[in-house]
Amino acid sequence: MVSANDTVNIAYANNDGSNDNGSSNHYYMRQALEQAYLAYQQGEIPVGAVVVSANGEIIGKGYNRTIMDADPTAHAEIMALRMAAKAMGNYRLTGCKLYVSLEPCMMCLGAILHSRLSEIVFAARDVKTGACGGVIDIHANHQLNHQTRVSMGILQEESTALLRQFFKERRQGKNHVNTNKV
Ligand SMILES: [Zn+2]
C-alpha cells in the first residue's frame, strides 16, 4: 500500500521556478474537496476537482454528477476541464494544474493528456479505477506524447473519509440519491 505522503512522480514547482511551500496545494485541494462535498450532498460519489491557471486562478471546477446527468463521462475532472477550457478559449490548458480529491480514472487521464495539463495533484488513491498507479500507471508509458507530473497525498485522509462515509450510507440504504433532473 502507498502511504499518505507517497508521491508518484513528485514535482512541486511553480512556473516562476520557486518551490511551493505546500500551503497553496492545500488551499486548492480544499477547493476540490468542497466540490466533492457538493457531490455528496446530491447523492453522487463524492469526488471534486478544480483547475488552476498558471497564475494561480481557479478557472474550472466541478464534481461528479454521473447520476444526475445520466452521463457516464460526467466525472469531476471532466466537468472542471470543460469549464477551464471555456474560460481559456482553448482546449489546451498548458501550464494549468488539476487538483482532484480522488485519483483520476483512465477516461479522465485521457482527457487530461489531451488538454496538455502540466500537473495533476490528487488526494486519495483509487485502487479500483485509478490510472496513475492505483490500478494501472498510464504515465509509465513513455511513448505518450505528453507527460504530466503527478503527485498525491494532500488531504488524503479527509477525502478517503468522505468516500467511506458515502459508501457506508449507501450500503445502509441511507443514501439521499437525487436523480431528479435539474
Ligand atoms: Zn474519471
Image (cartoon, helix red, strand yellow):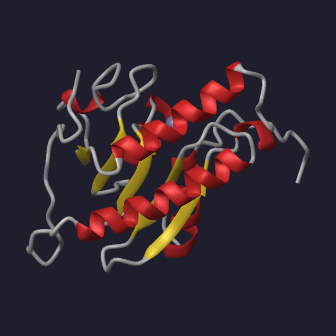
Seen in the picture, residue 167 relative to 158 is either above or below; the reply is above
Instruction: Work out whether residue 92 can be spotted.
Output: no
Identified at 62% across, 34% down, the residue is: 166
Q: Residue 86: where, in percent of width, then height?
A: 58, 69
Lateral position of residue 1 relative to residue 38, left or right: left
Seen in the picture, residue 141 relative to 145 is either above or below; the reply is above
Identified at 41% across, 78% down, the residue is: 57
Q: Quadrant of the C terminus?
A: bottom right
Lateral position of residue 70 relative to residue 53, left or right: right
Seen in the picture, residue 174 relative to 98 is either above or below; the reply is above
Task: Name the residue nearer the viewer: 118 or 153.
Answer: 153
Q: Residue 46: where, in percent of width, then height?
A: 59, 42
Lateral position of residue 40 relative to residue 76, left or right: right
Task: Name the residue nearer the viewer: 148 or 160.
Answer: 160
Lateral position of residue 66 relative to residue 57, left or right: right
Q: Residue 99: where, in percent of width, then height?
A: 39, 55
Q: Quadrant of residue 131?
A: top left
Q: Quadrant of residue 66?
A: top right
